[in-house]
Amino acid sequence: MLVRLAYSLEPRRVQQVVLRLPEGATVLQALVALREQHPQLAVQLVSLIAAGGLGLHGRRAHNAHMLHDDWRLDVVRPLVATPQQARRQRFEAQGARAAGLFAHRRPGAKPGY
């Protein structure tokens, strides 16, 4: 069975490696296969996996999770900021008057809703 391992060592640059695994392999067996099939890459990904973790279908993958043929296992980087913090930072950078629901009103329009 073939499983793709997707990882990103730098922002906006995703790379994939194909791992050949036995039928019914788990996430832990995929990591062992990564170390055997791509030893240099495994050294680079150890810190990323420890900090962020692994994901399957947008959810955290546990070591005992069974994989299926043609699935993609994602190496997830830790968040730099939560979505709420990122939104707050974007809003502060734009300025209060340039952003928001009522930023562009018709001349003479009432304030608020």
Image (spheres, rainbow, N blue to C red):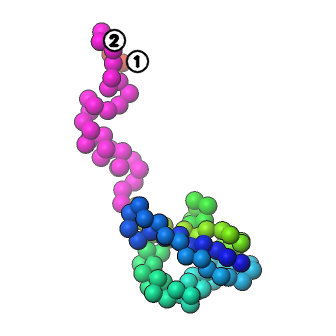
| Quarter of the image where the N terminus is located | bottom right
Residue 82, label in figure: none
Q: Amino acid at mark 2?
A: Ala
Q: Residue furthest top?
A: 108
Vertical position of residue 109 compared to residue 91: above or below? above
Q: Residue at x 33, y 14 (%)?
A: 106
Q: Which residue is mark 2?
A: 109
Give yes or no for residue 65 being in the magenta stretch: no
Q: Does residue 37 appear in the picture of this structure?
A: yes
* Mark linked to residue 113: 1
Question: Label 1 neighbourhood size at 10 Å, few (<14), some (14-19), many (20+)?
Answer: few
Name the outermost residue toward the right. Answer: 23
Q: Quadrant of residue 94?
A: top left
Residue 87, percent from left and from top: 36, 45
Is 107 in the magenta?
Answer: yes
Residue drawn 56% across the image and 87% down it: 37
Residue at 49%, 89% in the rendered image: 39
Callout 1, which amino acid? Tyr
Residue range (magenta): 80-108
Viewer-proximal residue, 16 or 47?
A: 16
Asked whether, in this view, residue 20 is left or right of residue 82, the answer is: right
Residue 98 percent coordinates (x, y)? 28, 31
Residue situated in front as seen by the camera: 54 or 15: 15
Task: Give the left or right position of residue 27, taking residue 38 as reference.
Answer: right
Q: Position of residue 89 (x, y in %)?
A: 30, 46
Tag 1, which secondary structure? Answer: loop
Q: Is residue 54 visible?
A: no
Name the side, left or right, on which 45 lies relative to 74. left
Which of labels 1 and 2 is toward the front? Answer: 2
